[in-house]
Each structure stands twice: as C-alpha cells, then as structure tokens.
Amino acid sequence: MTKRSIRDTDIQGKTVLVRVDFNVPLRDGQIADDSRIRAALPTLNLLRGAGAKTAICSHFGRPNGQVVEEMKLAPVRKRLSELLVADVKDAGGPAGELPGQVISKLDPGQFALLENLRFDPGEETNDRVFSRHLGSLADIFVNDAFGAAHRAHASTVGVTEHLPAVAGLLMERELTMLGNAISGASSPAIAIVGGAKVADKIQVLKHLATRVDTILVGGGMVAAFYVAQGRSGGAAAVTVEEVAAARALLNSADANIILPADVITAVEFKIDSEASVDESSGVPATGIILDIGPRTSAEYSRIISLAKMLIWNGPMGVFEWPAFAAGSEAVARAIASNAAATSIIGGGSTAEIVGSLGLTEQVTHVSTGGGASLEFLEGKSLPGIAALDDAD
Ligand code: AMP
C-alpha cells in the first residue's frame, strides 16, 4: 500500500509536527557525524518554503524514560540551526505545557525542537496520554524518521491516531529505494549479504532469495553454509539450527546462492591475529573465518560489475580490523564502480564502510536506517510506516 506523502498534502501555513531521527553519534559533546541531521533538511526546507510552523521531535540515545543531562538535544539544535541558517527555538518538554506555548508563538517558516522524546516514559510504551499530547501540538504529522520506523512508539505510531499522518521526503525516498531494490524490476539483481551470524540474517536471506537473481554470501555466516555443504566451517561455533537454515536456503529453488571460494582465517578472534588464506575446501579446524579471500573478492567484484540492481547488507568480514577489511572494501568499491546499476546500501555497518571509503556519492542510496532497513529487507511491515495515511 502506498503511503501519503508530504508532497500531496496541504501544508501551507499549517502547524506541523515532524518526527526525525537525530540520533547522531556524539564525541566529547560534539556531533561526530551530522548526516542524519542533513538527511532531514529537504523536508524541513519544504515546510519552511510553505510557511509552516514546524515543531521537530526526535529520540536520542537510551535515557529510559528519564531526563539524562548528556542526552539533551542542545548540541543537535545548535547544529540544526547552523544547517538551516535559522534560529531553531527550544520547545522544551517533550511533555507538559511548554512545547505548545513555544510552538504557538512561532512565525510562519520558523522551527522549534522538542526535547529528547525518550525523556518521557510514554514514548517507548506508545502511551495514549503522551501520544495525545504530541497530537495536540500540530495540525499535521510528518514522519521523516525511517531509522525509527521499526519501533511502535508514541511519536511513530500513537500520534498518528490524532493527526493526519504523512511520509516526509526522506521517508518517501527510503521506501522507494528499498522497495525498488527488491521489486524484481531490474535484472540481474544481486544481493550481497554478510554480517556476523546466520541467525541475524536468515530472514533477510530467505526474503531476498525470492526477490533477486543471485545472493553473494560473506561474513561469519559463511561457516554455517560450509558445514551445510559437508565442508569444514572452521573453529567458530555454529548451531544445528544455523546449519539447517543454511542447508534449506541452498536447497531451495529460489535465488542462486554463491559462497566464497576462499576465505581469510585466523586462529584467534583478535585484531592482530595472523591472517591466512584458505580454500573453501580446506578451512582448518582451528581457523576462524574472518573475511572472504582475495579470489572471492575478485569474483564477487566481477559479478557485481554485471548487475543492474545491487543491494548490500552486512560486511564481508570483521571490517573494523584492518587485516580482515579487504573483502568488504572490495565489495564497496565494486558497487560504487558500477554506475549502470541502481545500488542500495542497507544501513548500519554497511553504510559505515561505504562512508569511510568516501563512496557515498557514488552509490544510488545509502539507507539511514540500520534496524529499520534490515526489517524492511526481511519483508516485515514496519509499524511507523503502516500507521501513516494511505495515498488516495
Ligand atoms: P551486521 O551489522 O549485522 O551486518 O553485522 C556487522 C558485524 O558483523 C560487524 O561488526 C563485523 O565485525 C561482524 N562480522 C563480519 N564478518 C564476521 C566474521 N567473519 N566473524 C565475526 N563477525 C563478523
């Protein structure tokens, strides 16, 4: 079901509550990466252009329903003011009378930012009273927080019972891009799936297998696939369930599942472990698989270069450790080099790799949602999206 967009909504002069995801990383009280704030600017500028009075709200960290000094949004409001070249007012709250008073005094085109939503215990419990309070602050609700769409909270679900609720521009772009990636419209469509464990990715693998032509597998889950093939998976513990899940995927008639022909292993799970290259047929019983091998990097890069649609979720190895980062970097570069393909990076650590290599501009879309993009790729309905008004 297509959801109603802010573009199809009369926002002229209205008071609008916008849910954003400003859960940015802080280092020594400074914002280390402001991309989540930047990602909300198109919607905020659209609202300003329409003379809306805009109340912005976000969660930040995990204060567990209490006011935590270090989790106040002051640094975010400062950075947002700089980026918007506007004085974003402090609306306080998030509960109580202050937000309503500040918002009612806004001039058309002005902004106010509520305090961290998770300071109120009603946010995460999707409490009726807190939802009604949020709903009382505006005429229209815009959800631009794709990164929080997998949570059924007051500011993503409860509030939609009280106001017309539409998707912001970022939310719309996320849904269009991730939706296109698994629509089956472009072929060959290739998914690259990695990460630590099969258990974390089994639903993604199952769902993508019905949607794409080929899945390239990497990461720690390679061990379970090797064991399912009757090979050695090395020293990492794999459960009977993981092996059974891997076997079921290999035996299903859905997508072509490709496993690494070689891997990088180490005897200890440590940053400075000595790395060795092993063929898939000869993973030593003492070796822990920590990356895909050089032949596999080359082969995966070749396959990626031929794709028309690419979706990547999960690193090929322990990319945080330089000796085991080469596979993920090769995949990132191959995706960025294929200018003929639509390329979607599925958030979380995968987005981090692409960003750290400076390749973000060379891919079609980097999702701003880690957990949310994962659940989307698993084929689940995200509560924050389901709650929005349907398009006419
Ligand atoms: P995810 O965010 O679920 O995609 O998983 C990312 C994590 O998977 C990263 O922290 C990687 O270090 C980890 N990872 C990738 N490959 C392996 C591996 N072979 N063994 C253990 N962890 C891995």
Image: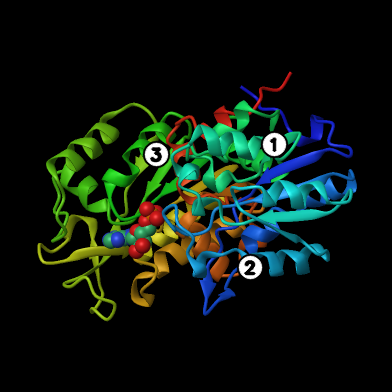
The quadrant in which the C terminus is found is top right
Q: CA distance from mark 3 to mark 1?
A: 31 Å
Question: Disc 1 marks which amino acid?
Answer: Phe
Sooner in the amino-acid sequence: mark 2 or mark 1: 2
Mark seen at residue 204: 3
Instruction: Indicate the position of residue 335 as horizontal and vertical percent values.
Output: 56, 56
Q: Name the residue located 68 percent from the left edge and 52 percent from the top edge.
A: 98
Question: Disc 2 marks which amino acid?
Answer: Ala
Q: Secondary structure at mark 1?
A: strand
Examine the rendered structure and indicate whether residue 341 appears above or below residue 317: above
The residue lying toward the viewer, choosing from 324 and 197, is 197
Residue 82 in sight in this render: yes
Label 1 packing within 10 angstroms: few (<14), some (14-19), many (20+): many
Sooner in the amino-acid sequence: mark 2 or mark 3: 2
Q: CA distance from mark 2 to mark 1?
A: 23 Å
Q: Secondary structure at mark 2?
A: helix
Instruction: Indicate the position of residue 96 as horizontal and vertical percent values.
Output: 61, 48
Q: Nearer the viewer, mark 3 or mark 1?
A: 1
Q: CA distance from mark 2 to mark 3?
A: 37 Å
Answer whether labels 2 and 1 touch (C-beta < 8 Å).
Answer: no
Q: Secondary structure at mark 3?
A: helix
Mark seen at residue 141: 1
